[in-house]
């Protein structure tokens, strides 16, 4: 799928990508919660 000749290489990069996406989504979630709190405090 990613174009590597060895499936193990693809599996390594797929795992890293999945972990990175998970970390980034966690960071985004905290940022959105913070913004929501700021907005509701202004209302």
Image (spheres, grey):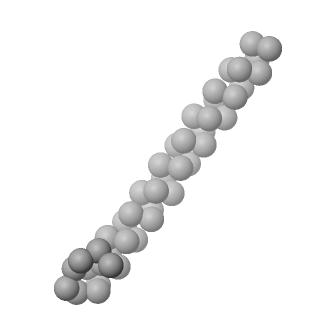
Quarter of the image where the N terminus is located: bottom left
The image shows residue 29 at horizontal and vertical percentages of 60, 43
The image shows residue 18 at horizontal and vertical percentages of 45, 65
Q: Is residue 17 above or below residue 11?
A: above
Q: Quadrant of residue 12?
A: bottom left
Quarter of the image where the C terminus is located: top right
Residue positioned most to the right: 43
Side (left or right) of 7 relative to 25? left
The image shows residue 39 at horizontal and vertical percentages of 71, 20
Side (left or right) of 10 relative to 24? left
Residue sitting at 66 percent across and 35 percent down?
33
Q: Quadrant of residue 28?
A: top right
Q: Is residue 34 above or below residue 24?
A: above
Q: Is residue 12 above or below residue 42?
A: below
Residue positioned most to the top: 42
Q: How many marks?
A: 0
Side (left or right) of 37 relative to 23? right
Residue positioned most to the left: 5
Residue sitting at 44 percent across and 62 percent down?
19
Near-viewer residue (18 or 3): 3
Side (left or right) of 21 relative to 3? right
The image shows residue 8 at horizontal and vertical percentages of 29, 84
């Amino acid at each position: 799928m990613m174009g590597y000749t060895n499936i193990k290489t693809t599996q390594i990069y797929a795992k890293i990508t999945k972990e990175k996406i998970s970390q980034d989504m966690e960071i985004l979630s905290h940022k959105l919660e913070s913004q929501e709190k700021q907005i509701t405090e202004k209302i």
